[in-house]
Image (spheres, rainbow, N blue to C red):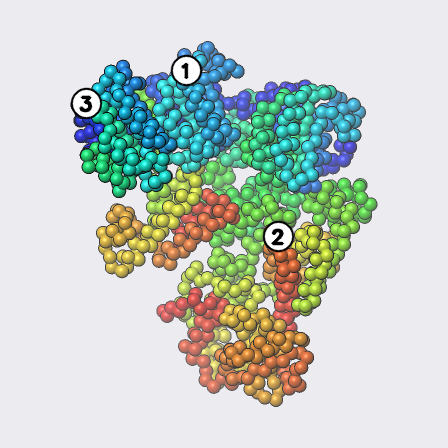
Amino acid sequence: MNTFDIIGQSALINRLKIALESGRIVHSYIFAGLPGAGKRTLSNFFAKMLLCDGGSKPCNTCQSCSQVDSQNHPDLIRLTSQTKTIGVEPIRELRADIGIKPFQGSRKIYIIEKGDTMTPQAQNAFLKTLEEPPEYAVIIILADNLAGLLSTIVSRCQIIRIPGLSTRQVAEIIERKANISSEMALVFARLSEGLPGKGLDLALSQEYREMREESLKILEGLSKSSLVQAMGYIDYFLDNRDKAIEILDLMELWLRDALVLKQSSCQDIIINMDKLTYIKSLANNFTLSHIQCIIENIEDSKKMLMSHANFHLAIENLLMKIQGSGEYVRSSRSTV
Amino acid sequence: MLKVGDPMEYTALYREWRPDTFDEVVGQDHVIRILKNQTNSGRISHAYLFCGPRGTGKTSTAKIFGKAINCTDPQDGNPCGVCRVCTTIDSENNMDVIEIDAASNTGVDHIREIRDKIKYPPSVGRYRVYIIDEVHMLSTSAFNAFLKTLEEPPDHIVFILATTEAHKLPSTVLSRCQRYDFRRITLKVIVDRLKSIAKRMGIEVEDEALDTIARWSEGGMRDSISLFDQCISFCGTSIKESDVLAILGTAGNEFLFDVVNNIMKGDISSLLIQIDRLVEEGKDLSVFLKDLINHLRNLLIVDICGDDPSGLLDVSQSTLEEYRRQASNMNQSRLVRSIEILSELDAEIKWNTRPRIMVEMAMVRICRPQDGNSIEDLIDRIAILEKQVSEGIPIARVSDINLSDARRTDEDIAEIIQESTSKKLGFRDLDEIKPSKDEPAEKDKEEHQGKAQKAGKQEEAKKIAKDTNAQEATIEKIDIEEVWDSLLKKIRRERMAIFPLLRSTKLQLDSRNKNIVNLVFPSQQEFYVAAIEKEDNSQYIEGLLLESTGQKFKLKCYTEDNVPNSISKDNILEITDEEAPSEEEEKEDIVQKAIDIFGKEYVEVIDD
Amino acid sequence: MDYRKLFREINQGQWQGVYLFFGEEQYIKQQALDQAIDALLDPSFKELNYDQIEGANVDLDTIINACETLPFMSERRLVVLKDLSVFGGKSDGDIDEDGFLEYIKKMSDTTCLILYCRDGVDKRKKVYRYINKTGRAIEFKHISGRELYKWINQKVEEQGKNISYEAMGHIVDRIGNKLEDISNEIKKLVSYVGKRDKIDIQDIDEVVVPTLEESIFQLVDAIGEKKSNRALVVLGNLIYEGGQATPPILAMIARQFRIILQCKGLHEKGYNSATIATKLKQRPFVVRKCLSQGRNFTVEQLKEGLELCLKVDYHIKVGKIQDTLGLELIIVKMCNQ
């Protein structure tokens, strides 16, 4: 991994470099950013910088750098978790381990992935260590959501925000790593809203492409169908229960694009740029008020699903509402 | 100066700049003065309570006080820093000024431990000082155990309790302590402090950058110094505002002013483009939201407090001027609405899968009050409409992409305003009109669609009103489908239960019998037919028809599958008006319209 | 018995038996106890003849033992029992009330027992009635009026300063009449003025933080007079300087609307302010104020105000709006009609 892989974060990396060069490194950091923003990549890079023995850090030639690259540097310890939350145990282990001096150099780095899923007990156990860490230690907590961390922890760390990238930058990353056209790379970049990890995942996922197509078809269908036909669309959702929220997200996106299209001068900010004609037709089939209303309904449905409401009922209800709007518009036209 | 080289520990800036004497503490003169005098006079209390927001100097002051009262050679109330006592307290061997973090030591046992130890005299000074931080975190039993000690502390013990949440302390604790309230530190004081630190360290920093840092910390000195520290770490000896914005993920003041301008203009396009820019630049949307809400709130304060908002708005003079300018041309109800809508979003946005869309939708909602139903939405709408009416702008707008947008309800309102002004009906303050409890108004069809679309300029409306007065016998042509549309709206309000059965139906005349009207249901809805054919339902519908057309009809129900041939293709009904509508009746018409839109409870007729 | 009589008796050294100290005024009550201890006990043997027992978890035997112990080289033994649960409303104490009463009736006459309650007592309890009959139940109520001002003045002079009548009033206005609080503030003021002799109103403004009650009164007053500017400033002080929490503030604002509404309603029915005061159990001064403020709102507006408070309270609790902002919106909406 070299600097070129970290497209778009040159400003951030530069800041870290300046800090390192002036010796202003603290003992605890929080790398905060949405999933797919690049927290892991950047924290890894930072760790490499901190451990590097060479001149311009990271030099990528010294032993330390190669060890980091091959993921077996003895003084870079990563805490990952397979479970939903991180309990007290792994933290206790960390505390026991942190007392041991580094093997190779002058620093020992801990990267805690998904740090915001630490239980309150785990976080409390962690506090002491954050307050008085050994001189050689640097702790990096990766967090999707700062709200998941106790304020007492946040106040003891330096927060490094991982900003989102521009569409162009994400597209560039996608193009390098996925074998797709540059037009489609742009689309997936837009869909990822600045998160390169996410953009890549979406671009490589056949399933996602299908969901895109299907969700659009469903929306089109709903704008023209009868009530009974509308209810029929539930089958797709039932077949893809675990992806329901993503599908709803996609539907929201199509509608959002239709809304944007209705506002003259805004074509540039359409997200699904590859389906402009379909979006135009959606814009024709729904009024602005309806789009607002439907998006609200979709949000409600998402909330309901996340609170384990009855899946069938929630989706069915949504389908009927969308169909109702479509029908309303059609019938209102016929009387004008 | 900045050190270069090996990985080594550097002292966090706020530690380096922590005040060592009372004179170095900023913004709390009212407290410092008392403590200094107490040090000098020796009239020391045994229990103190320091309250106030974070980063305002509570712990620092407590430590200084702890040193000062023990110091053998105080300098005008300040600890000298060089005597044996002062140096011991500063060192690792300090056993006389003890800091306890109540947040991590909430239990009774810790308190008991303290109780047991307090009988031992101090090691070097006259007093042993316990500083208990965030004391409100103690458990109830810990408090109770502590109370006894607070009541009768030994002479050589001094307790200094510190908290950001004084209201959480039991009154028994409060009354045993001398209470000191630490104030939020003003922007100016913070900026001045940062400037002096910058000077001493040889750092160049833009004024706007300092301003942004100070604002972000909300009156807490420690937070602003920490942030400044971070900026120095990441930017070196020259710090620009853009750097600070990048580190914080915030968009900056200028951008916010722009956004608010667009909100006031209702310019959705520009707002969408601005949001896109935020995302493209990798800014944090929830930070943006908070900043925007804060900005709007500041505008509100400026709008209301006009002359002297300084106590409530801690901003620089130039920013204050800009606020004034923006507030001078503003729709206050939209402002309040925006604050409410955005606040609601702010709470949810952290957990939302598509925050960008939510922000965009919130903007659309703010700019399109015609689709909302809260009072604020209505007030906002009326404000806009009244402005348009007075400017002679046609109400029925042509929408953007050749679609008839659901603006009909606005046209209703406009019509009512125009007609009532022409007929001299009093129109009570619309603040007090609440919407009917229907679903969004755009889903309802209005009653006199044709007329509404004609209702353009004010002159025209007056003309219609005059004409209506002058008319004598009229033959009105009514489209039965239109009538049915508006009746459906009524049915939905009055008999919700049967509405779903009727929503997809069509009403059609009968070519053979003028007194029959046919209700046609979609295919295979026999079940619905049966339900509607029940006596009270069909009678109800017939009653509605009578009311709105003046004619008695008999209702017959069919599904598409078994519709008779007698159904008329022509749906226009001719109704003869025997008498000209009197002024009274016309008044009633308008009132009825108002009632239909807003609901009976909310319409009151005031005869002038 | 009046506590002043008590002090006289103490100074004459005349007493024995059981006493009960209770009531809201902590400062004087504590003083009385301290004086009793000093007056009753020979300092040389104080440790041996004095027992202070926490009433919370004690059993009757412990009490009896303490009381039955003979004084050492002294006429009297003093036992102080703090916050015995038999006096409280709940009967979950470990002490059997009857047993206790039995005992104290025949307690050894070399012992003086002072029952010290921080709060009030349940005057229906048998123990209370017995002690009261013997004339030794002493209630320490808050002092007010001339007595209060005399007290404040004395305290200030004791510390070598002086204070004007208006300034004293200002202190009371800001923090009420609890002597504990006043005593603390006086100490601060005395330190604050340093070499100066006189404590004036500006000093009090700087040093004495108004109680929540006082500040909120100013706040709701401003709202009642539709002075949104002032209301916002007072609110700002409350929140940002005083660090007050928002729920009690909101409750008090709602309460103000409520009282104004009630006063207005009763007034429209024809009642005069004195009657209204009795009916609503409010001070006449409050009623007069609310009636006057009632002219600034219609009944509808007041009802809406209450509804608005409810709505904002709910929204704050579910996080739909930030708390200070919610209160500011209430002020803006209610004052700008």
Q: Which residue is mark 2?
A: A308
Task: Report the side of B31 relative to B415 (left or right).
Answer: left
What mark, if any, has residue B264 been given in the picture? none
**Disc 3 to disc 1, C-alpha distance:** 35 Å
Chain hosting mark 2: A
Disc on res. C13: 3
- Identify the residue at image location x=78%, y=23%: A62
Q: Residue furthest bottom?
A: B512
Seen as rendered, the residue at the extreme right is A179
What residue sits right under mark 1 in the picture?
Answer: B121
Q: Amino acid at mark 3?
A: Gly
Q: Quadrant of the N terminus of chain C?
A: top left
| Chain letter behind tag 1 | B
**Lateral position of residue A239 relative to residue C160, left or right:** right
SS at badge 1 = loop
Which chain hosts label 3?
C
Residue B84 visible in rendering: yes
Indicate which label's residue lies in the foreground, 3 or 1.
3
Locate residue C72: give its quadrant: top left
Most foreground residue, C232 or B508: B508
